[in-house]
Amino acid sequence: MPALAHGRRGGDRQLFLLARAAGITHPQIATAFKADTNLKTYHTNLKNARQAMIACLLSGANCGSQISTYASDSQLLTNEKLSVWNGLFEKTTSKQQAAAQNVLSELQQIQSERKSIFQQVFGSQAKGDSSESHQ
């Protein structure tokens, strides 16, 4: 599987999982991403823009242009990847879409539970920390 298909971000992993739930095979996903000729160019451009932006930031100069280029290149890559995913999901049946929707609902429930746990843990620590600091 090409790195561009999996990506490094949660959104790409989630789309991969939903695609698999919809019955889209690993080879279909890999083929779709490999077939998009713009992805490699956009990825390279983003990498170069990031390096230029970081170098500028570390120099202490005004980096508005480099930041803008990085943001623009990031958006281009994101749009292209989402277009590939869109093309894959467009070919699914309503039954496959329903299967993916069920998995999405389960993922959203898990995320909600995870958020609640974090709020309980960090919320109670924050209250304890603030009350201790007032004593």
Image (cartoon, rainbow, N blue to C red):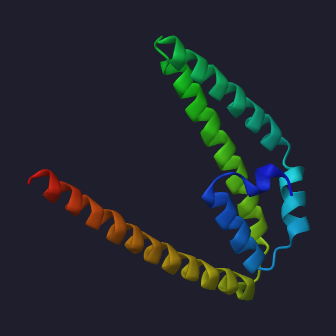
Image quarter hosting the C terminus: bottom left
Please, which residue is most extreme toward the front here?
135
Is 60 left, or right, of 75 in this rendering? left
The residue drawn where x is 87% and y is 59% is 30
Residue 108: give x, y in percent of width and height. 51, 76
| Coordinates of residue 75 in the picture (x, y in percent) | 60, 41
Q: Which residue is painted at 53% across and 11% down in the image?
A: 59
Q: Nearer the viewer, residue 107 or 33?
A: 107
Q: Nearer the viewer, residue 13 or 35?
A: 13
Left or right of 51, for residue 62: left
Instruction: Answer with the quarter of the image where residue 31 lies.
Output: bottom right
Q: Seen from this angle, which residue lies furthest bottom? A: 95
Q: Depth check: 116 or 89 in front?
A: 116
129 up-or-down from 46: above or below: below
Q: Which image quarter: residue 39?
A: top right
Q: Is residue 25 left or right of residue 59?
A: right
Residue at x 50% of width, y 17% of height = 63
Q: Taking 66 as reference, is 119 above or below it? A: below
Work out whether 42 lies above or below 35: above
Residue sitting at x 57%, y 82% = 106
Quadrant housing the N terminus: bottom right
- Residue 60 lies, with reference to residue 135, above or below; the image says above
- On screen, residue 15 versus residue 70, left or right, reads right
The picture places residue 78, in percent across and down from the top left corner, at: 65, 47
